[in-house]
Image (tube, helix red, strand yellow):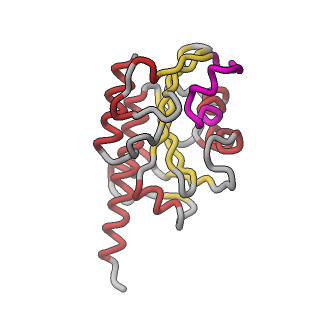
């Protein structure tokens, strides 16, 4: 499992979808979650960077997990997701600050994503509110944006969630290019 986390983390960093210590990823196996450690570097994960805990576990172990653990938990508790990926795609974040949703204009984005809802809340990092809202939306969508913060994508695997994350950023970049071509 570590190899999959490493591959996805390296892709996120190389594609510019996270900063050196940004983003997080998790996989669900039954009633267990494997989630990246708080402040881990997704681009060069090591064995101790993946935390294993129960879906409802409390106690000292949760302090080692990503700050976004509450969001991952709510998504798992309210969906069939096998994996959750949180990234900070810059063009999509910029669009989330001015749009209520992101509607890809390119063929791939339109087919894979249709539209990407933007969640607006005052407590954007690791909040149960974001988790509950995201979980509800992720029953219908593959990925959501938290306004000014980042994306949460779901899939059966981390690779599938990465596909939606990279597609979102490519679609957002295309929207920016189109805005530059529109007559003023």
> From the viewer's perspective, is residue 183 above or below residue 27?
below
**What percent of the width, then of the height, locates residue 168?**
40, 49
For the C terminus, the quadrant is: bottom left
Q: Is residue 58 left or right of residue 86?
A: right
**What percent of the width, then of the height, locates residue 172?**
39, 58
> From the viewer's perspective, is residue 74 above or below residue 166?
above
Which of the 4 quarters of the picture holds residue 171? bottom left
**What percent of the width, then of the height, locates residue 165?**
41, 43
Q: Residue at x 63, y 37 (%)?
A: 135
Specify start and end residues of the magenta stretch as a single range.
54-71
Which of the 4 quarters of the picture holds residue 21? top left
For the N terminus, the quadrant is: top left
Q: Is residue 155 left or right of residue 163?
A: right
Between 77 and 25, which is closer to the camera in this rendering? 25
Q: Residue at x 40, y 17 (%)?
A: 47
Which of the 4 quarters of the picture holds residue 7? top left
Does the stretch in magenta take in 49? no
Q: Residue at x 43, y 25 (%)?
A: 157
């Amino acid at each position: 499992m570590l190899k999959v986390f490493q591959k996805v983390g390296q892709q996120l960093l190389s594609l510019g979808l996270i900063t050196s210590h940004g983003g997080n990823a998790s996989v669900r196996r039954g009633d267990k979650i494997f989630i990246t450690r708080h402040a881990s570097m997704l681009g060069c994960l090591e064995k101790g960077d993946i935390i294993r805990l129960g879906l409802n576990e409390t106690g000292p172990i949760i302090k080692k997990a990503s700050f976004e653990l509450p969001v991952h938990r709510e998504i798992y508790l309210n969906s069939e997701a096998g994996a959750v990926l949180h990234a900070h795609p810059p063009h999509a974040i910029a669009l989330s600050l001015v749009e209520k949703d992101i509607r890809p204009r390119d063929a791939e984005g339109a087919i894979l994503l249709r539209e990407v809802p933007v969640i607006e809340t005052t407590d954007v990092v690791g909040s149960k509110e974001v988790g509950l809202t995201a979980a509800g939306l992720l029953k219908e969508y593959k990925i959501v944006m938290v306004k000014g913060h980042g994306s949460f994508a779901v899939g059966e695997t981390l690779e599938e969630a990465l596909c939606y994350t990279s597609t979102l950023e490519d679609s957002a970049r295309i929207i920016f290019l189109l805005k530059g071509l529109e007559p003023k």
